[in-house]
Amino acid sequence: MSVHCPRGPIMVDVAGLSLTDAERQRLLHPLVGAVILFRRNFQSVAQLRALTADIHALRSPALIIAVDHEGGRVQRFIDGFTRLPSMRALGMLWGQSPELARARAEAVGEVLAAELRACGVDLSFTPVLDLDWSRCAVIGNRAFHRDPEVVAELALALQTGLLRGGMAACGKHFPGHGWVEGDSHHVIPRDERSLEALRADDLRPFARLAQAGLAAVMPAHVVYPAVDEQAAGFSPRWLQDILRGELGFAGAIFSDDLCMEGASAAGDITARARAAFAAGCDMALVCNRPDLAEQLLAELDVAAPAALASRLAGMAGRGSAADWQAHTASAEFAALRAQVAALHAQDVAPQTGPAVGEAN
């Protein structure tokens, strides 16, 4: 029998292919509201379905299950899933035919979402809205294009496909991670440009998607000193004044992983979470460090954001896994899958670039 408990503001992970007793207890903690999965949590489609069903059965409302499953080199689940192209492949297709690129972006979004929903996953942290300035290796081919209008158009099409596949969209990494050369998993990057320069380029896709009802945003662990000496994910100026105030964004704000080096300036794990919530984040992620997750759950003393329940409700996947299993077995879906697989086959070095977010 599931335990009735509102979703809390912390997202944690699990170690393996099934839940341990200790992990079940952690996921029942009232501060926990979501779980993020990684490649280590996947062996087969059947195993993944069993794991997500087990997680969802623990609580009511069910914990949100998320994953980084963008395409290209950031696709956590492979066997039994359609290989997704990098987003740069869609940007290159735009140069040949904007109409075809939009159609393929919708197809990628629907296939990505429906296959995950058929396995009980609620949310993928996608699309990447960073611009491809050809400077940041960790972003690289994860970005659609250099032109902010092309990025916005393709991201809107991808969002349409995601919604069709039963899943909300989460744009990242606000206000843009594409200019800095450093990888915020390992350093604290600094983007020295002015707010005016950022408004002219990097902020434009976020503005377009916010006006189109984007459900969630993930800020960057990047410092923009011309605006604030705090990294964007710890900055009320960025999250409250600019993202919510200026851009009119009304969805959920997920911190990036608080265990990344880019978050280290905010202090220990509890100080980082407090700073993220004070800045305006709705949910804080703690990945690959169960010891720090336990510390945070023991020490955190802040109330959940007032709008957390309604915002997280929008992150839950639509439809049942069984319904999506039937949909993904249809001839119509097979045609979409073939389009996406063909685009992946034409992709130029889709795996090129650093690994992203995995513990090993």
Image (spheres, helix red, strand yellow):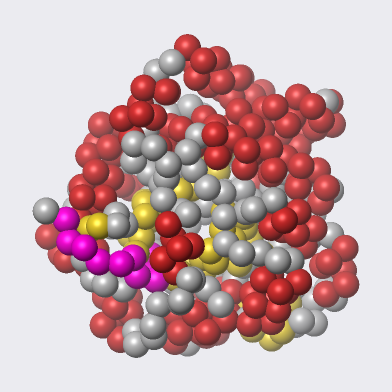
Label count reads 0
Image point (33%, 79%), residue name: 296
- Whether residue 318 appears in this view of the structure is yes
Inspect the magenta stretch and tell me whether residue 143 lies in it.
no
The reply, left or right, for residue 173 in relation to residue 289 is: right
The reply, left or right, for residue 197 in relation to residue 185 is: right
The reply, left or right, for residue 64 in relation to residue 237 is: left
Image point (41%, 66%), residue name: 309
Q: Quadrant of residue 224?
A: bottom right
**Magenta-highlighted stretch: main secondary structure?**
loop
- Whether residue 134 appears in this view of the structure is no
Vertical comparison of 11 with 115: above or below: below
Rendered-image quadrant of the C terminus: bottom left
Q: Quadrant of residue 95?
A: top right
Counting from the top left corner in percent of width and height, residue 9 is at 39, 71
Counting from the top left corner in percent of width and height, residue 63 is at 31, 57
Image point (17%, 61%), residue name: 3
Counting from the top left corner in percent of width and height, residue 258 is at 46, 72
Looking at this view, name the residue that lies furthest to the top.
331
Vertical comparison of 325 with 210: above or below: above
**Residue closer to the observer: 80 or 297:** 297
Image point (73%, 31%), residue name: 102
Counting from the top left corner in percent of width and height, residue 108 is at 59, 32
**Residue closer to the observer: 105 or 193:** 105
Q: Quadrant of residue 159?
A: top right
Magenta range: 2-11
Vertical comparison of 47 with 55: above or below: above
**Residue closer to the observer: 250 or 25:** 250
**Residue closer to the observer: 221 or 170:** 170
